[in-house]
Amino acid sequence: MKTIALLPAGSVSDEAAKQLFAGEEVAWEYHRLIADVFQATVNGTSDYSIIPIENTIEGSVSLHMDWLVHEVDLPMQAEWVYPSIQNLIGRASELQSAEGELDFSRIKKVISHPVAMAQCLQFLRTRMPQAETEHVSSTAEAVRIVRDHPGEGIAAIGTRIAAATNGLDLLANEITDHDNNYTRFMLVGKEPYTAYTSNRIKTSILVTLPEDYPGALHQVLSAFAWRRINLSRIESRPTKKKLGNYYFYIEIEKSMDDFLLQSALQEIEAIGSSIRLLGCYPSFTYEQLLNRSGN
């Protein structure tokens, strides 16, 4: 049985993990902080870690990407997307007006993970502009704080599962600013993920350019372009070694076994760029996972 490290029960990570591993017998190892999720797999107490790395609205989760690049050496083994459906959670009894309606002006503070909070800014600004906002380590942690602090005017942004698990009410359903709000998750660990296969295989690499080679980025991209290799993502991030020095995170729509990709990487190395392979892995759409689990 595989052990999976992830953010707390009731978080979007928890929901997404159960979608990927539907029908498999696994053990869940929950952690409050993303650093502990990573370290669980580094230290061998779990086989895999589940890491949210990108969101439709907020883009790249930079902290988590930096962990993958700078702090740990855990290959990417699978990726999938999952809808981030956020809700306002609290105690309805504390907000009811004399007419029996919910009075959101009584909410003094809203807490959640910063990415989840950013997904609901329009709702917060229009429905409760008076409320202070505070970031915590996960949506599940936010809901637990609300549970443990009754009567203090605190509400959380989180999942339906977290509300039900903690005996709280859904004060408002599906409060995200956009309907197409998805989060992309990465499964990282030392063993390949083989439970299910996908017809879409991706490769992720880091490219660091030579400092004394003008036009190096153009030549890197040209190595892919003239071979008609599709790049689904390219992002620059600081190397943290020198101001103005960056590496480029690149996602490629091909397997490392592909001859064209291998020749492109050889060309990139020939101009003095360094390449670090982060993983070659199956990529699953949300619809694929739904069909596979029979939902």
Image: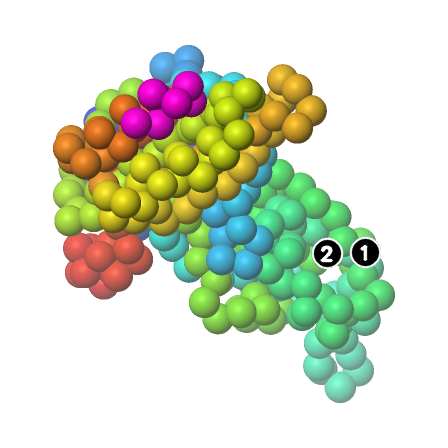
For mark 1, does the 10 Å Cα neighbourhood hold few (<14), some (14 to 19), or many (20 or more) residues?
Answer: few
Which image quadrant for residue 173? bottom right
| Of 181 and 223, the residue lying toward us | 223
**Is 33 situated left or right of 288 in this image?**
right
Amino acid of disc 1: Glu
| Of 231 and 171, the residue lying toward us | 231
Query: Quick check: marks 1 and 2 in contact, CB under 8 Å?
Result: yes
- Is residue 146 visible in the rendered structure shown here? no
Asked if 249 appears above or below 119 in the picture, the reply is: above
* Mark linked to residue 113: none
Q: Which residue is mark 2?
A: 110
Amino acid of disc 2: Val
Residue at the extreme right of the image, as rendered: 130
How far from the left and from the top, in percent, is residue 270? 34, 21
For mark 2, does the 10 Å Cα neighbourhood hold few (<14), some (14 to 19), or many (20 or more) residues?
Answer: many
How far from the left and from the top, in percent, is residue 14? 42, 44
Give the Cα distance between marks 1 and 2: 6 Å
281 drawn magenta: no
Q: Which residue is mark 1?
A: 132
Asked if 25 appears above or below 144 in the picture, the reply is: above
How far from the left and from the top, in percent, is residue 171? 62, 69
Residue at image location 35% in from the left, 34% down from the top: 204
Q: Secondary structure at mark 1?
A: strand
**Is 129 situated left or right of 245 in this image?**
right
How far from the left and from the top, in percent, is residue 119? 59, 60
Residue at image location 69% in from the left, 24% down from the top: 243
Q: Earlier in the sequence, mark 1 or mark 2?
A: 2
Q: Magenta residues, as a range? A: 267-273
Residue at image location 44% in from the left, 58% down from the top: 182
